[in-house]
Every structure is written in structure tokens, then in C-alpha cells.
Image (spheres, rainbow, N blue to C red):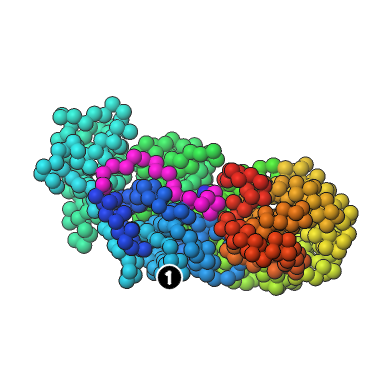
Amino acid sequence: MATPTGWRREGNLPAELTSFIGRTRLLANLKRHLNESRLVTVTGIGGVGKSRTVLRLAHQVRTHYPDGVWFADLARLQDAGMVKHTIASALGIADQSSRAESESLSEWVGERDMLLIIDTCEHLVQGCAELVHELLEAAPNLKVLATSRQSLHLPYEHVVPVPPLQVPGDDPAESLFTNESVQLFAARAGASVPDFVLDEESIAPVAELCRRLDGIPLAIELAAVRLRALSVEQILGLLADRFSLLAGASRTALPRHQTLRAAIGWSHELCEPAERLLWARLSVFAGDFELDAARFVCSDGRLPSEEITDLVTGLVEKSILLIRSNHAGVRYKLIDTLAEYGEEWLDKLGQSEQMRQRHLEYYLSLAQRSEDAWSGPRQIYWFVRMRQEHDNVRVALEHSLKAPGKSAPALTLLSSLWFMWVCCGFAREGRLYLERALEANPTVSKERCKALWVLSYVKSAQGDSAGALQAAEKCSTEAVRVGDSRAVILASKMQGTAALLQGDLQKASALLGVAIEFNTDNKELNPGLLPAIVELSIVLTTQGELYEAESLLQDCLQVCRERGELWLSSHAQWALAGTRLASGRADEALQNTREALRIKRHFHDTLGMLMALETAARIFAMSDQIELASQLLGALHQNWRTAGLPQLGAPWMTDVHDQCVRECKRGLGELAFKDAFEEGARLDLDEASALALEDPDAPDES
């Protein structure tokens, strides 16, 4: 999955990968309706260009929305219960709390003047309609632009159908050369065959081809790719054969649905047999994927792994697959309409279950590799990689949880990704899936024990200390029954974390001490040893044992440096700032806090950034930068509301926060404090971090 997007005020619009042809009147019409209505739904058949048109419109109007244009793609989402979460994730909302998703969504949108695009709603219409209604009622400045093959059936919805492109002959006065279908074909043909020229000789067959394809953009683009091997006249002949085969096949399908299926089917037939088989098998992927994934999931005796690369290249050349290159590498994506066609073929071949199982196996193996490597020098790589694979992880989880008698792998997949749920802003999603997987696997096992301590960790990240303690105690009980000593130790650590959040420092000290003692010789740094050290140092600092706390943290940071561990080192830096601040070393504390913030921005660690900003506000208040401290308090107030329970509900954090507020009010006076506080409340998390770093132009670390 892409890097989270809520860190840019302007939104998260995908780039336009191809030139946009025609649709001038449609775009003008859409702009007018978007000005007049708060909900516009763009409808039309698959392949007609709904998503592409909406993306072009969004890029044209993005400057009209001060709080950005946001894009949420639901095309491959299977579970209607995940609609709200998927949209929240697209908005970059890292809500760690356990409250209702729609509540946090509505609160985040609030007074923002923004446009939300929800792409591909037809298979989740009811869930989308309910959410859109809730959001529009709660957020007066929000506008929603949806794409769907059917409307959302809301009373205030304005539906705009996207027709096929104009074809030659629709307007008798129009020149064939300026017809938009012809122009689209010419543009894509020129990209496929650089020496293609639209001239007096080629115009007639091109115009006829566009007419035969009913002006459907996807069909035209698929046809243009064939120019690498065929002339326009040959393409026409093949297409005529395909249409004659289709005639009478479906009396209920609309002619243009038949045209698109004919064009896809014709393109399918022009693929080599091995390419067709790979096309069908690739349909199990959600979003995009890497070549290694295709090699593992799709290969067997019929498709040897060593042939997959050339076959993928062939599908890219035929415009079946899109290719995307960025700093993280090359990834591939099967166009949604073509993925549906591939799924149909996979079902006909009787290979759907086999391929979905292989898909699950691949992502289970990838999750386990990422867990093993998480505490090492490639931590940033694995953070980026697993976010890119987020959609595929979801699909693998859904398959495991829905397959009768095959839900056990879901426990392993989920618990291997503990760092994704706890460290990377997905606590809510992790909790939802973990609870489902545990319910589906009630038999006591080592896999279940691991899922329970992971669930405890996730609940702690949400500030649900009571729930965290309950899950950890259950883990401990079950671990004793199955003889899982590692789970017993980790359950002790998680109980210590929950006790720390509840302010029971004596209990936290004892439990964390046990976890550290039994983990000292363990090569695994996370999530047992190093987090326990950081949390024990917080206990010691709160109890006034500053030297012992600092010594622990210095040792922890040394281990992190040796191993290349970054995420936990940021927590150690934050804890060290608190220790040094308690001993009156504000300048050193500020350096530690800023280093923590810099690292946390790499991971988009919402919870960690908020905790670091709490410390920054205290440091500025103590250093007579009271206006800056007050601005940060305002930013904290606003951003905690959308991230979860303020200060995680921990008494040792809430008491210090409240004291900081009182000091700032005394230092500035009520009115000046209110002004500074409200100014800060307008800052998003990235802007507040830049303020604390005293770098207003600090780039987003995505």
C-alpha cells in the first residue's frame, strides 16, 4: 500500500499516468454539478472511463478545496464492514481509539473544506451510501464525488452518467480527425507504435474501428495496442470475427456491455495461451504487486517460474498490466475491468481456490520475513514494503477467515504483522482482524497465544488499558496450558504496559522487570526486550530515579545503533527527553525530542509523534517560549481528538499535560493563551511537528 496520505493538506490524488482525451462537455457539466451539489455520483459501464474522468476533474478543481482532494479506491475491497476503515486509511487518519469508525471520520472531516472521491462503489453500495450520508450530515463543507456502475440512491445525490466517447458520425459536421474516439486511438497508437501516423490513408479504417468499438475508451486502448503486430484493417477483421461469435450470446446484456466484453475477449484471444493463463491467475492480487509475488503465486508445471517475467512483460506490452516505478521499485497492476474478466476465467478453469491459497501462502511468508527483519537495518524498507502490500494482506486475511476450516493461518499472518498494527498507525484495523481471527480459532494453541499478546499490545496503543490487561492475562493462562514460555514472558510484558498506562507503577515495574530479565539473552529485541526497557525507564523517571532511568535508556539506544533499529530508538529518545527534562536539562531534552520526531515522521507514527509533541510543549513552557508551547497544546488538543484517547489515558501523562496548560495560561494570560491555542488547533500533525522542529518548510518524510 502507498505511504499514508493524511500528512499532506492538499490531499492524495494519484498522478495521471496517461494523457486525457476529449470529454470537454462532460467535464464542464461535472464541474457545474459539483458546484451545485454536495454529492455527485458518476455512473457508467465498466471501461467507459468513470475513474479516469473523475481523476482529470479532480486535478482541475483541486485548488478550489483548501483542505485537499482525497481519493479512496474501493475496487478490490471485499468486506463491506471495512468501507469506513478503508476510507479513513485513505484520508491518513491513524485513529488508535476503539470508538466507532464513522465517529472519528466525521470528527476528522469536521469543518474541513475538502472533496472526497470514492472510486468504484457498485459492489458496496449500501455501505458507501450510509457512510456518505453520515459524513455529509456531520461535515458542512465536505463534498463527495463517487464513481459506480449504479447510483447510491440518496435523495440529494446528483447522478451524472458517463457515456462512451463520441464516435465518427455522431456529429455529421465534425471532421473525422477531430473526433475524440479517433484522437484517443491515435494517441494510444502513437504510444504503442511510434511511427504510427493518422493520415488520409488510415483515417477511414480507424474511424470504422472506433465506431465498431462504440467509443468505449478501454476497448479502444486495447485495440491500439494490437498495432504492434497488426494493421488497422487486420484488427477490424479480427474484431468482426469476435463480434460474430458473440452475437446472440446474451439477450439481456446491453449492446455496449457486449462490445466491451467482445473487445476484452478479442484481446484475450490474441494473447498467447500462457499469457491468458497468467492473466487469470494474476486476478487474485489486490491493488499492485511485485514480480516475485507473481512468480510465487502463479507458477506451477504449466507456468514455470522462470517464464513469468517474460509473460508479465508481454501483458504489459498488451496494456493488460500497468507498470508503476518509484523509489521503492517496480510494481504491476491488473486494470480492474480486466481483473474481473480474469477472475471469470480463473473460476472456469477451476483454479480460484488454488490461486487464493497460494496468494495467502506468499503473504504469510512475506509477513514472517518482515517480522524477522523488523528490528534490523532494513526497518524503513519493511515499513514501506508492508504498507504497499496492505491491500493484498487484507485479501489474504479475508480468504483465510472466510474459507471453512482454514482460518488458522489468519492468526499467524496477523500476529506476524504486530509492528504494522502498533507502529504504523493501523491499530484499529489490527484489532478488528485479530478479534475476528481469535473468535474463528477458539482452540488453545501457540498461534492463538501469540495473537492474544499482539491484541494486548494493539489495545494498549489505543489507550484501552483494561482491554489490554484482559487479553494479556488470557494469553498468560493459555500459554501455561500449551507450554509456551515465550508467550508467558510476552504476556508479562504486555501486562506491565497496561499497568503503566493505568498508573500502577509498582505493578508495572515488577512485570516489566520480569520481562527484561527473561529476555536479556534473547536475540529478539522487539516487542519484548527493548520496549520493556523504555517503559521501565518511564516508571523510574516518574518515581524520581533519574540516573537509573537514563542509564537504561543509553544502553537501549546503544543496542538500537548496533542493530540499526530506528522505530524503538525514537521511543527511547522520547523517554530520554523526559528523564533529562526532569533533571533540569531542557536543551538536551529538546535535542532528544526533536530526534524522536524526525524518526517518527519516517514511520508516520501518529501516536509517537503526539507523545513527542507533549514533551516538546513542556520543554518550551519551561524555556519561556510560552506562546509556542500554547500553540503546540492547541495542536495536541485537535490531533488527539482524531487519533485516539488523549495521552492514552495514562495519569502520569495527563497530570503533566494539565500542569503545562495551567503554566501557559499563567504565563500568557487567558486571552493570549486562547489565541495561541486556537492558532495551534488549526495545525495538522505534520505542521505541528515542523513547528516543534522550528522548521516550517520541513518536507514530509513519505
**Res 564 → quadrant:** top right
Residue 686 or residue 357, whichever sits in front:
686
| Residue at x 82%, y 68% (from the top left corner) | 505
Quick check: 613 left or right of 520?
A: left
Membership of 18 in magenta stretch: yes
- Determine whether, in the image, residue 78 is placed left or right of residue 556: left
Is residue 398 among the parts visible in the rendering? no
Residue extending farthest left: 172
* Amino acid type assigned to the residue bearing label 1 in the image: Glu
Position above or below: 143 against 319: below
When asked about the image quadrant of residue 558, the answer is top right
Q: Residue furthest top?
A: 195
Q: Secondary structure at mark 1?
A: helix
Q: Residue at x 43, y 44 (%)?
A: 15
Magenta residues, dominant SS class: loop
Can you give x and y, in whole percent of width and height, for residue 247 in the image? 17, 53
- Where is residue 319? Give x, y as percent: 35, 40
Q: Is residue 552 left or right of residue 318?
A: right
The answer, for residue 293, to whether it is visible in the render is yes
Residue 592 at x, y percent in the picture: 75, 48
How would you rate the neighbour count of disc 1 (Cα within 10 Å): few for under 14, some for 14-19, many for 20 or more?
few
Q: Is residue 667 above or below residue 261?
A: below
Tell me what residue is drawn at x 65 percent, y 61 percent.
672
- Percent coordinates x, y for residue 334 in the rendering: 41, 47
How many numbered marks does the figure carry? 1
Does the stretch in magenta take in 272? no
Front-most of residues 308 and 453: 453
* Image: magenta residue range: 3-24
Quadrant (top left/top right/bottom left/bottom right) for the C terminus: top right
Q: Which residue is mark 1?
A: 137
Residue drawn at (43%, 62%), measured in percent from left and top?
Answer: 142
Q: Is 24 on the left or on the right of 589, as rendered? A: left
